[in-house]
Image (cartoon, grey):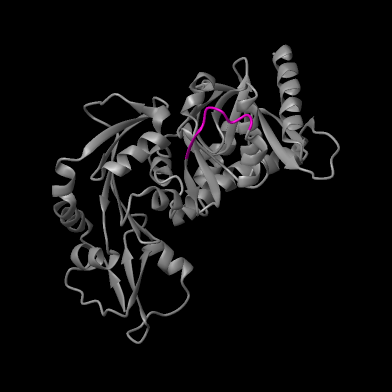
Amino acid sequence: MRLIIDNWKDKIQKLETRIGPALDSAEEVFIDLAGLKTVRVKACDNTAMRLIGRELGWVITNPVPEPDATIYLWKENEVRDFISEVIMPDLEIPAEEEFLLFSKTHYFEQTNRTVSGSDPYAAIIIPTGQVNFKDGTIFLVDGNNYYYGTSSYEPDRWLREGHVFVQMLFRILNTLPNASLVHGACIGLHGNGLLMCARGNRGKSTLAITALLKGFEYVSEDYLILQSENGSLTASPIYSIVTLSPQMYNALYDEFDRARFVGVSSWKGKYVFDISGYSDALRRHYPVRACLFPDIDLSAKKPIVEKCGPLEKNRAITHLAHSTLFQMWCMGLKQTQNDSETILKLARMITPLDFYKITLTPDIFANAECLRAFTESMNNNI
């Protein structure tokens, strides 16, 4: 059975009628995205608001009369009920039947099998990019309004979803020609930032957090906002949390004195900490002077920093773009898998910078000291 949704505005009206009473008296908070966009968040759940304060404490700002976008959070206990009452109110859904939601593009390009009346699945074809349905959560987009429904806003569920706003913030920022949310890390010294370009499990988060604890200036170890203007590149933070594997947390235990434990992310299998206690090290609109391409070598005797050749520079650029789009894809934005426009934009923003490769050893403190020596020498040459 294949069902195509046409009257999308009518579905949004039904949704607003459904969740309106819960949101009428909801709390709201405003998020400043590096001065580029202001986003209002309205949540029907107090627990959600507390978690937003922990995750986004560094970018919460004063209310503005006309925000650029609004995110609505509501509780939706059963996705099946949502489908039957909002998406397809005239559809009878057998209790044993499972439902898949596709965009038109995703369905016709990614699905090769034929969906028929005898198939145990029913595919609902919806406008491209309008709905994502993942792990019992609902994410809808209508212009500058973003709707996020889930059965629970308790910390364990919230952390399982990862950075819950990241896919929305990516879409909001990605409309700008010279700015983007990226999956990377940024630290530095004396106002000179280093942007770490690497996919996951290459040591950038551990290096960035260790550098923070050893007195570096800090922007982010995971997601950040890059902005290019008049030939210069700046980085700004989003999240005031960090994630560490249990092994890395144990290695940094004696240094980690101003962080507060938030919970365990079962999605990543890592500990999550609120690091707002390190606000003295935080930098906004931080000038990025060079890019760093980390590479772990367990057999290396000592860490070393070397200038990248053309091939490694291209690899670093590819890592930043691929890691960013892959993370968005994992969060449900399936159309980002082959987003050539974003890839070209990110490449254009960072290509003018010098690129360096840092070979990391198992000694995380030696890695941070090597990075300090390199950054100090770089500062002396500017």
Residue 33's place in the image compared with 147, above or below, is above
In the rendered view, does 253 fall on the left or right side of 174? right
Q: Which residues are magenta?
A: 254-261
Judging depth in this view, the residue of 117 and 269 nearest the camera is 269
Residue 312's place in the image compared with 352, above or below, is below
Residue 163 appears in the figure:
yes
In the rendered view, does 362 fall on the left or right side of 210? right
Task: Look at the magenta stretch and give its main secondary structure.
Answer: loop
Question: Where in the figure is residue 346, as x and y percent of width and height?
Answer: 55, 38
Per the image, is 152 magenta?
Answer: no
Residue that appears at 38% across and 44% down = 168
Q: Residue furthest front?
A: 254
Residue 197 appears in the figure:
no
Question: Where in the figure is residue 120, as x and y percent of width and height?
Answer: 37, 82
Quarter of the picture containing the N terminus is: bottom left
Quarter of the picture containing the C terminus is: top right
Question: Where in the figure is residue 360, as x and y percent of width and height?
Answer: 76, 38
Judging depth in this view, the residue of 183 and 316 nearest the camera is 183
Residue that appears at 31% across and 43% down = 47
Judging depth in this view, the residue of 347 and 323 nearest the camera is 323
In the rendered view, does 49 fall on the left or right side of 315? left
Residue 308's place in the image compared with 10, above or below, is above
Residue that appears at 50% across and 31% down = 275
Residue that appears at 76% across and 40% down = 362
Q: Quadrant of residue 310?
A: top right
The number of discs equals 0
Question: Where in the figure is residue 340, as x and y percent of width and height?
Answer: 53, 48
Q: Residue furthest bottom?
A: 118
